Image: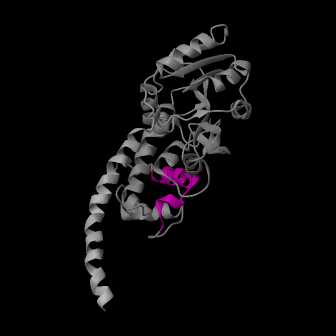
Amino acid sequence: METATRKRPEIEQAVRQIPEQLATLAPMDERRRDSRPRARRTARDQRRRTHGQNFIRSDAVARELVTAAGVRADDLVVEVGAGAGVITEQLARHAGRVLALELDPAWARSLGERFAAHANVTVRHQDVLRCAWPREPFRVVGNIPFGITTPLLHALLDDLRRPLVRADVIVQHEVARKRATPGPATVLGVSWAPWFAFRLVRRIPAAAFSPVPAVDGAHMAIERRAQPLLEPAEQRAFARFVRAGFARGGHLRAGLRSQLTNNQVRILRATVPFDDETLCNRLDADAWVALFAAARPYLGAR
């Protein structure tokens, strides 16, 4: 007991000195932290981060994309986000004409110089979300900046007068899976489906991009239907019908009741059987088209 009592002041003194010792270590840690080299973020880095740009590293991936797209010598191809020109190089070998669009001015200048001798390649420094699309039939091929995938799909698909024949684009794998594989339906997927068919061609590992993104990419093909499920003139009415259907908590009957009477909903059940618990996202595009066709005489009549 006496030994413990004698040592207690020594222990208390050591404890009191701990904050002082830590304080002397902090400046050294700070100096060590400051000595680490920090890369300056360039304007290009900022634009890449803003738009989610991750460039294709491999010629093989670009070659597989263009080959799977079936690009032919009589095609006009618009490349979105041409970047360093890895995909442009492959398109120049197969397409009749290539219009390469690039937002970054430095990349656009570099592309213009690189492909100056290619008579079938035109490079434009342009924002793909604000560009004037061709008035003749065209294809789209490219590695879409992940941050603008949905706005670009709207730009390509919302106006059926735009003569897009097919798009083969690299997007996030989850986006391609949601748009192109059987599963829970979405408002946008259903709204575009009567005129365009989506297909997930292949998964592309994150390591194929530079810088390496946090998720894998995928080649998604979008092809205009030779025989659309609805007439182009019905596009807006169908989109309104689908949006209203999804709007009431996801239950189909509630969504239909926002547009139709109880008796009209009962009539629709004879076309596409459903109950009070049926969810909108469980119906595929064909079922939505059938519902719309059956509801068409009543829409706007309430």
In percent of width and height, residue 282 lies at 53, 61
| Towards the viewer: 179 or 110 | 110
| Towards the viewer: 245 or 69 | 69
Question: Quadrant of the rendered structure where residue 237 is?
Answer: top left
Is residue 289 inside the magenta stretch? Answer: yes
> In the figure, is residue 240 to the left or right of 90?
left
| Towards the viewer: 76 or 284 | 76
Overall secondary structure of the magenta stretch?
A: helix
In percent of width and height, residue 183 lies at 58, 57
In percent of width and height, residue 63 lies at 73, 30
> In the figure, is residue 79 to the left or right of 237?
right
Q: Residue at x 44, y 39 (%)?
A: 36
Q: Which residues are magenta?
A: 278-295
In percent of width and height, residue 95 lies at 70, 20
Q: Is residue 224 in view from this perspective?
A: no
Q: Residue at x 27, y 62 (%)?
A: 19
> In the figure, is residue 42 to the left or right of 300?
right
Q: Residue at x 26, y 74 (%)?
A: 12
Relative to residue 179, is residue 195 depicted above or below?
above
Q: Residue at x 31, y 59 (%)?
A: 21
Tag count:
0
